[in-house]
Amino acid sequence: MYALVDCNNFYVSCERAFQPQLEGKPVVVLSNNDGCLISRSAEAKALGLKMGEPYFQVKPLVQQHAVRMFSSNYALYGDMSGRVMHYLSSVVPEVEIYSIDECFLDLHGMEPYLGPLAEQAAGWRHEVRRRTHIPVCIGIAPTKTLAKLANRLAKKSPTMEGVCYLDTDGRRQWALAQTPVEDVWGIGGQYAHKLYAQGIRTAAQLAGQSEAWARKQLGGVVGARLVRELQGTPCQGLQPSEDGTLSRKSIACTRTFGQPLSAFADVLGAVAHFASKAAEKLRRQGSAANVLTVFISKNRFGTEPPPHTRSVVLTLPTGTSDTIELLRHARAALKRIWEPGAVYRKAGVVLDGLETAGQQQLLLFEPNEQAERRAKLMADLDKVNQRFGAGKVKFATAQLPKGEYTAPWAGQHQWQTPAYTTCWEDLLCIRA
Amino acid sequence: MVPAGFPSPADDHQALRLDLNRLLLPHPDSSYLVRVMGESMSGGESGIRDGALLAVDCHLQAQHDDVVIAVVEGGFTVKRLLRRGDTWFLVPDNPSYPEVRIGGEFDMIDVWGVVTHVVTETRRGRLATRVRVS
């Protein structure tokens, strides 16, 4: 059996943990730079506010219903996520942190030790709530795909009290019949469209297909696995990370600028900052990247015709986590897509093709000694920044222009709450 | 190279330095630090002065005579939780402040966490300079 534990409206719940007066009120959290809705309380959903809607479009609705709005506070969300995951890792031996607000637990053979799983899950849910004040839902099923589906049902129907356990074949069938095919984990909009055209509307109908059919219609072995998982045969195990944090298959660092930028140096500064950040993340999880993507975007709501985004994908000569190396390539990449005179709103750096550092193929002509020295330099850089604060030592390209305190590309966070748990000045203040 | 000097006699007895986190924040998932603003708990047994730093553990079950962070009318407050007969009260250590009657049914949702430690400065130091002004 697998369990999927998913935090309800995670960002909103984090805000509520430190502001109890928000309980029962419509609350939304906006994406970086206060762009779009990325988390909504049940009350906000009931008002018809949709995920991903730009703030300026929903402003009248938000004002009319006095919806409480917050800028995203990732320092807080990251810490609260860590607390939830820390507790869950203490109750079962193996967890896979799937995203900031959800994780899989491996429950194989655990029943004799834990007792009835549904009762256990109810207990975990209660404990997470007590320790972190974050409400979670838990789906338990024989496969990860079914656990995901069970979790969705636990969220949908309040009578289940946050736990849905598909322990029998009857319950599995019932759950499949309840679930529209587009809500199955791994079925995207494209496939859903295709399936509907063939008369397949529910997960139950999809589970009734043969493996050969799935192989042909749903993209080969991936589709065949998906159908088998729905039928109750596990095809994918847990992918636990070694250090208890999310091990990423790609690392992205993208941001909308606080103000439109048109100077190359400013955009380069932003790109260099993102690349440095991404490289730091890369080293923290002990990976090296083989592919570097840099993109820049213009205003997508403006009058200019598309394309609004230009990107360039570089295959690096060798897998690396070296900031110097990545910055050099990022600058070259940016030069290739830069249009003089254009006004940019957003940029990003994505590192792909990750592999374990130290396993990469060495270049024939690169002296090995230098690589070792550079790795040491990076390790020391990370240590200094860890000890004295993020970004204390950085590369000149990512440096702020002289005399400026905030970067020209830094985002706006008009409605950000304090970092209650990670900053001395921001601690929760309690009236006595 | 030959190291000069004598080896330290303490080398075999190296121990880890004491770590206050283990005392104040024993549970990484449920221990929190908060600051106090106000006088309703000062002068009493808890020793919670205005500006004190509190260590709070949220996984502890609140009991009679615990100092707790409670939610009253949507806002946080720090008070002593007392049971008199069948009724629960939130009582300030400072008698010049009013107490709050919770009622017969003791609803756990109202208690956010249990205060386990109080940190105050005897000399104006880093704690005093790190107060958020809002």
Image: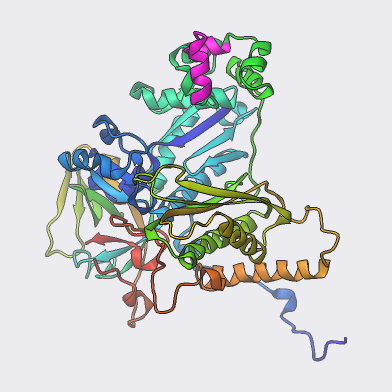
Give the quadrant of the C terminus of chain A. Answer: bottom left
Numbered range of the magenta stretch = A189-207
x and y, in percent, of residue B63 in the image: 32, 48
Q: Is residue A316 above or below residue A267?
A: above
Residue at x 81% of width, y 53% of height: A361
* Residue A348 falls left or right of residue A235: left
Residue at x 34% of width, y 77% of height: B121
Q: Is residue A395 above or below residue A82?
A: below
Give the quadrant of the N terminus of chain A. Answer: top right
Q: Nearer the viewer, residue A225 or A411?
A: A411
The figure's colour scheme reads rainbow
Toward which corner of the image does residue A104 lie, by quadrant? top right
Q: Nearer the viewer, residue B51 or B8?
A: B51
- Does the magenta portion include A104? no
Q: Note whether residue A393 is visible.
A: yes
Residue at x 60% of width, y 24% of height: A143
Main structural element of the magenta stretch: helix, strand or loop? helix
Q: How many marks?
A: 0
Residue at the far bottom in the pictured view? B5
* Residue A159 falls left or right of residue B43: right
Q: Note whether residue A1 is visible.
A: no
Q: Is residue B89 above or below residue A123?
A: below
Residue at x 54% of width, y 63% of height: A272
x and y, in percent, of residue A112 in the image: 61, 27
Q: Nearer the viewer, residue A280 or A85?
A: A280
